[in-house]
Amino acid sequence: MIAIKNEHELEVMRQACKITAAARALAGEMVRPGVSTKAIDQAVHDFIVSQGAKPSFLNYSGYPASACISVNSTVIHGIPGHYTLKEGDIVSVDVGAYYKGFHGDCAATFACGAISTEARRLIDVTKQSFFEGIAQARKGKRVQDISHAIQTYVESNGFSVVRSFVGHGVGRQLHEEPEVPNYGAPGRGPRLIPGMTIAVEPMVNVGTYDVHILKDGWTTVTADGKLSAHYENTVLITDGEPEILTVTEGL
Ligand code: MF3
Ligand code: CO
């Protein structure tokens, strides 16, 4: 069952998502050489708590931190730790906040100082693929219309989309129905209905789409060691344009 949120629930979700987006922005501002991923995680944690919310990821299936911080060839679920960022790194930060019964979920990849032109292009294509996807996130369309638009855009730019992790419904639970893959045939999957809230989150690799999960059970890396980027927002299906809920005022 795909949950349809009513106006009251959406008002609360907007608040949860605003906190989540602000946490992402704060993390992005901390990305610079010499900063440890642990310090960014701590700042994300403290900010979310200061807003009266809870970090959605902390202890989720045993996940040990508030943010996922995935550097270079780490695709997702990088566990913050002692690694200090260096010039040229690309840094994916994924955050979630739980507020008054609802979750927000968003991510972005940030440049640490000057990065290669290929890395820049990867970040830009990944972000744009999200917007290509949500151009299809309209009432009456189907989930895989989003998926297909993302895949087409990414592959036409010579990159690949990760298959083994997908976007998802989000609301009272961090992960709800439906699954929102970043690849697939158009015209398939559940029909989109106003009041659905979904996390659309393309994970894009420079090389192969294959990934490996490290022995810690979380850290997911590209199989070929090449770069990966991630971009995610929580999105509301409406009667018209989709509404991006994980927005920061002034950004
Ligand atoms: N944004 C990711 C997702 O939607 C974050 C999950 S990390 C976890 O799956 F730790 F919470 F699992
Ligand atoms: Co997500």
Image: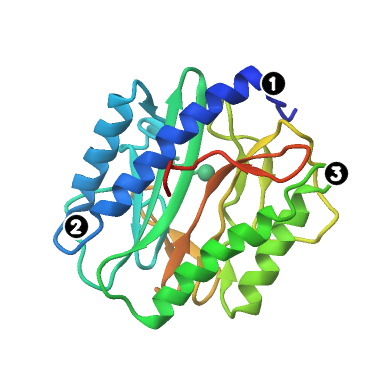
Residue 83, which numbered label? 2
Query: What type is the residue that disc 3 sits on?
Result: Gly
Nearer to us in this view, 107 or 15: 15
Q: Residue furthest left?
A: 34
Nearer to us in this view, 53 or 25: 25
Residue 41 figure quarter: top left
Q: Along the polypeptide, which appears first: circle 1 or circle 3?
A: 1
Q: Position of residue 52 (x, y in %)?
A: 34, 20
Query: What type is the residue that disc 1 sits on?
Result: Asn
Label 2 sits on a secondary structure element that is loop
Q: Is mark 2 within 8 Å of ligand 1?
A: no
Residue 245, which numbered label? none
Label 1 – label 3 distance at C-alpha? 18 Å
Q: Residue at x 25, y 57 (%)?
A: 31
Query: What type is the residue that disc 2 sits on?
Result: Tyr
Q: Along the polypeptide, which appears first: circle 2 or circle 3?
A: 2
Residue 226 figure quarter: bottom left
Residue that label 1 marks: 6
Q: Position of residue 238 (x, y in %)?
A: 73, 37
Q: How many numbered tags mark residues here?
A: 3
Is 63 placed above or below 136 here? above
**What colour scheme was applied to this rendering of the protein?**
rainbow
Q: Position of residue 62 (x, y in %)?
A: 38, 33
Residue that label 3 marks: 140
How packed is label 3: few (under 14 Cα within 10 Å), some, or many (20 or more)? few
How packed is label 1: few (under 14 Cα within 10 Å), some, or many (20 or more)? few
Label 3 sits on a secondary structure element that is loop
Q: Are marks 2 and 1 in contact (CB under 8 Å)?
A: no
Label 2 – label 1 distance at C-alpha? 43 Å
